[in-house]
């Protein structure tokens, strides 16, 4: 078989990947690969909205300052200003596509979320991501020059070093066609990784099952640096219910007056003012640690988020999806509080890039949650993620449009002889479960040197076992995802071990103070 040739390969079909495809399709033949259906990524799940300076009393500097404060000294100022200045245009682009943003009195309704000093979050009630994805998917399906490959899981990147051509950069990739069980070869002078984050490395997460760090792991294996992987954002309020999986209770609930309280058995009192003067509007790392502290102090399974003091009509208008989902589970949020727990939510670090999304390898780009642009620092400000996707999708597209032509080599096909089924494939599911549990226990909201050491030891054992499976047996989607998750877990732990302070989302009992100088963590392959 010959390779499938395109001008640009985009791996991932969330807001970042589809935005890039739309910007490139007018001048390039684009392939979008996604391991499930187009709408199965994390962008679909985003509730709160998209931050941009749109209000009369707001300013670019205010949005920049709020981002820097939340990032605890680690945000890159140039990247922060780059995104914030382009955020209003990104909202305008989505409105032109037909995204039905919520309005009030004929103008965009802007809400406020934790860490923001102004109302600047444009939203579509409480299901912004789903509305944006619907419009983008419809637009992509109608756009010529975009070929969609659903059910195609990234196996590995093909680089010049792999081919014995050290200066050839990225040449393409291998992808598993899940329907046919065939590994296909894709070739292009430009490859964009937009595969999202790695929330599924933790036992409890707001992320969908697709969030397995595929792009981060593949880029690392190919020779790219990664940065700030220790900063995993735990969303403070994930719905706690035995029949609710990964359902997020939006930051906007607290932005509109929701209060965090202990259960009646522990006094039923509000606790955030005792932890931070900003109370429920403190940044996510502060709120998550406060909830974790109260749960451990009182031996609780969860705490409660109470928005019942708002009129029912207000809740129906602003949070219809949260209200409906809770009602399905017997929780009437107009009359009673919502049980919540923190859960792994966002990977602030990732593949190190410049302001055009370029990585260390020529022809390879990373955008969205896969990348570390410097915007988020040690803690992402609420609703800055979707706008980052759009800003860097356009930046990468512009860079590709201006890039000189690159020569491509003939690519070797995947070795089809490796088709033996593993006789102990059940071990993979056990390894997956073990990884997620010890990452939650040892590399969660609060860390210690000993916990990190234990996690590193277990990761080393799992890596050896998974490498054996990968080298000897037929690859499967589960094996590919577990391989990537173990690699990303190793990067998270290595990064956490190298940071001897507590900053932003990384809190260590052994190093509780803040270092005098804020320095990003950068890991180099090899």
Image: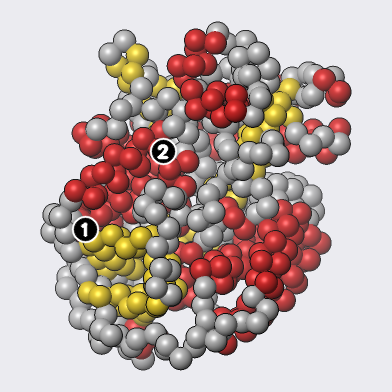
Q: Residues within 10 Å of mark 1 (few under 14, many from 20)?
A: many
Residue 445 appears in the figure: yes
Specify the label residue 167 is tagged with.
none
Q: Which residue is mark 1?
A: 146
| Residue ID at (78%, 24%) | 262
| Residue ID at (44%, 50%) | 40
Q: Is residue 267 above or below residue 490?
A: above
Q: Residues within 10 Å of mark 2 (few under 14, many from 20)?
A: many
Q: Is residue 425 above or below residue 491?
A: below
User: Cα distance, mark 2 to mark 1?
Assistant: 22 Å
Specify the label residue 129 is tagged with.
2
Return the residue found at the far left: 27
Q: Position of residue 155 (x, y in %)?
A: 44, 73
Residue 501 appears in the figure: no
Quarter holding the N terminus? bottom left
Q: Please state which of residues 239 and 281 is positioned toward the viewer in this rendering.
A: 239
State left or right for residue 113 relative to residue 516.
Answer: left
Determine whether the residue tagged by mark 2 lies in a helix, strand or loop. Answer: helix
Number of callouts in the render? 2
Determine whether the residue tagged by mark 1 lies in a helix, strand or loop. Answer: strand
Q: Please state which of residues 97 and 361 is positioned toward the viewer in this rendering.
A: 97
State left or right for residue 470 relative to residue 279.
Answer: left
Q: Position of residue 517 (x, y in %)?
A: 60, 51
Q: Position of residue 383 (x, y in %)?
A: 46, 36
| Residue ID at (69%, 68%) | 431
Q: Earlier in the sequence, mark 2 or mark 1?
A: 2
Q: Position of residue 290 (x, y in %)?
A: 73, 34
State left or right for residue 239 relative to residue 321.
Answer: right
Q: Please state which of residues 370 and 29 is positioned toward the viewer in this rendering.
A: 29
């Amino acid at each position: 078989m010959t390779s499938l040739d395109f001008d640009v390969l985009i791996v991932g079909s969330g807001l970042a990947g589809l935005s890039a495809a739309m910007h490139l399709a007018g001048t390039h033949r684009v392939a979008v690969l996604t391991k499930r259906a187009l709408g199965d990524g994390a962008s679909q799940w985003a509730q709160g909205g998209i931050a941009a300076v749109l209000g009369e009393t707001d300013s670019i500097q205010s949005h920049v300052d709020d981002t820097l404060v939340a990032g605890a000294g680690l945000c890159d100022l140039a990247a922060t200003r780059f995104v914030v200045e382009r955020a209003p245009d990104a909202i305008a682009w989505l409105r032109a596509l037909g995204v039905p943003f919520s309005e009030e009195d004929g103008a965009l309704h802007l809400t406020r979320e934790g860490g923001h000093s102004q109302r600047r979050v444009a939203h579509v009630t409480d299901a912004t991501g789903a509305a944006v994805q619907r419009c983008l998917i419809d637009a992509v399906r109608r756009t010529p020059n975009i070929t969609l490959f659903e059910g195609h899981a990234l196996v590995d990147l093909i680089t010049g070093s792999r081919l014995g051509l050290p200066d050839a950069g990225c040449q393409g990739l291998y992808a598993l066609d899940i329907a046919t069980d065939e590994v296909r070869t894709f070739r292009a002078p430009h490859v964009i990784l937009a595969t999202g984050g790695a929330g599924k490395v933790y036992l409890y997460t707001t992320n969908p099952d697709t969030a397995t760090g595929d792009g981060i792991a593949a880029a690392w294996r190919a020779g790219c640096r990664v940065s700030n992987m220790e900063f995993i954002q735990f969303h403070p309020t994930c719905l706690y219910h035995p029949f609710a999986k990964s359902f997020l209770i939006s930051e906007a609930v607290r932005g509109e007056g929701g209060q965090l309280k202990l259960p009646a058995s522990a006094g039923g009192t509000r606790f955030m003012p005792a932890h931070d003067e900003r109370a429920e509007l403190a940044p996510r790392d502060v709120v998550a640690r406060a909830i974790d502290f109260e749960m451990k102090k009182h031996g609780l399974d969860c705490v409660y988020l109470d928005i019942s003091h708002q009129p029912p009509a207000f809740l129906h208008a602003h949070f219809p999806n949260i209200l409906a989902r809770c009602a399905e589970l017997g929780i009437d949020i107009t009359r009673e509080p919502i049980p919540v727990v923190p859960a792994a939510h966002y990977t602030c670090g990732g593949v190190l890039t410049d302001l055009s999304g370029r990585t260390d390898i020529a022809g390879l780009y990373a955008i969205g949650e896969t990348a570390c642009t410097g915007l988020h620092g040690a803690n992402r400000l609420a609703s800055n993620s979707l706008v980052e996707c759009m800003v860097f999708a356009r930046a990468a597209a512009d860079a590709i449009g201006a890039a000189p032509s690159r020569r491509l080599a003939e690519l070797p096909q995947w070795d089809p002889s490796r088709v033996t089924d593993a006789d102990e494939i059940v071990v993979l599911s056990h390894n997956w479960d073990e990884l997620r549990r010890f990452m939650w226990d040892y590399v969660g909201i609060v860390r210690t040197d000993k916990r990190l050491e234990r996690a590193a030891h277990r990761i080393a054992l799992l890596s050896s076992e998974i490498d054996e499976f990968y080298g000897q047996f037929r690859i499967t989607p589960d094996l590919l995802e577990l391989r990537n998750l173990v690699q990303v877990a190793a990067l998270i732990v290595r990064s956490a071990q190298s940071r001897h302070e507590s900053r932003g989302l990384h809190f260590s009992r052994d190093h509780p103070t803040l270092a005098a100088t804020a320095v990003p963590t950068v890991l180099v392959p090899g």
